[in-house]
Amino acid sequence: MPTSASRISDTPREVFQRGFTLLELLVVVVLVALLTGTVILGFTGADTEQRLRGGAEQLAYTIELGRQYALQRNREWGLYVEPDAIEFAEFDPEERAWVTQVGRPFDKADLMPGVTLRVESEGLGDLPSAERDRLPKVILFSSGEVTPFTLFMEPEWNAPAWEVSSDGLSRTAAARAEF
């Protein structure tokens, strides 16, 4: 004899009560959409930060490569810094002029959108402003030394800047700025 707990009811009223209402389904769909949007936006922000970090590290490596070229060729190299781009140049002693490098990896490099550059360097303060403006902001000497500098990569969005720096003797490194 079947008990009431083991009995399966086939009445339409009890079958209807086992399903979900339209309101319950809509609430679940909205919650899933909100969670998905939050996760996607979180990854998008992380992607931008990763690109900024990668740009700072790539710049540090390129400056070190320029330092090696200056050492190997026994010529001074320079780094011109504009708010939105970086340009390498080699000093030609015969022409007594800085010659812009056009080959990879030293051709003019534009930054990712929304990032501006600012450089603080030492050693050029004694020159008149007209001469100082014509010289590169950072000089990579043929001896392997470099003008001590700190280059800030400042994003427009609300995030700390990255700095690429060297004290003149140590390797150029990229790190998050401490402000």
Image (tube, rainbow, N blue to C red):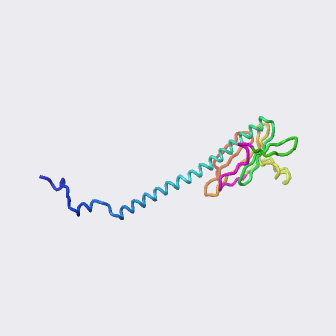
Q: Nearer the viewer, residue 16 or 57?
A: 16
Task: Residue 79: give x, y in percent of width and height.
Answer: 76, 46
Compared across the picture, whether 126 is left or right of 104 comes to right
Q: Residue furthest left?
A: 1
Q: Is residue 154 magenta?
A: no
In the displayed structure, would residue 100 be above or below residue 41? above
Q: Residue furthest top?
A: 72
Residue drawn at (26%, 62%), measured in percent from left and top? Answer: 16
Q: Main secondary structure of the magenta part?
A: loop
- Is 139 above or below relative to 32? above
Question: In the figure, 97 relative to 45: above or below?
Answer: above
In which quadrant of the rendered view does residue 25 lie? bottom left
Residue 112 is one of the magenta-drawn residues: yes
The residue lying toward the viewer, choosing from 59 and 122, is 59
Q: Residue at x 78, y 42 (%)?
A: 77
Rendered location of residue 67, percent (x, y):
74, 39
Residue that appears at 49% across and 54% down: 39
Question: Front-most of 140 and 9?
Answer: 9
In this picture, residue 95 sits left or right of residue 50: right
Q: Which stretch appears magenta?
A: 103-118
Which one is in front, 157 or 47?
47
User: Which quadrant would residue 174 be assigned to in this image?
Assistant: top right
Q: Decide if residue 131 is on the left or right side of residue 50.
A: right
x, y (%) of residue 110? 70, 51
Q: Quadrant of residue 83?
A: bottom right
User: In this figure, what is the number of numbered marks?
Assistant: 0
47 with respect to 136 (left or right): left
* Percent coordinates x, y for residue 49 in the rendering: 59, 51
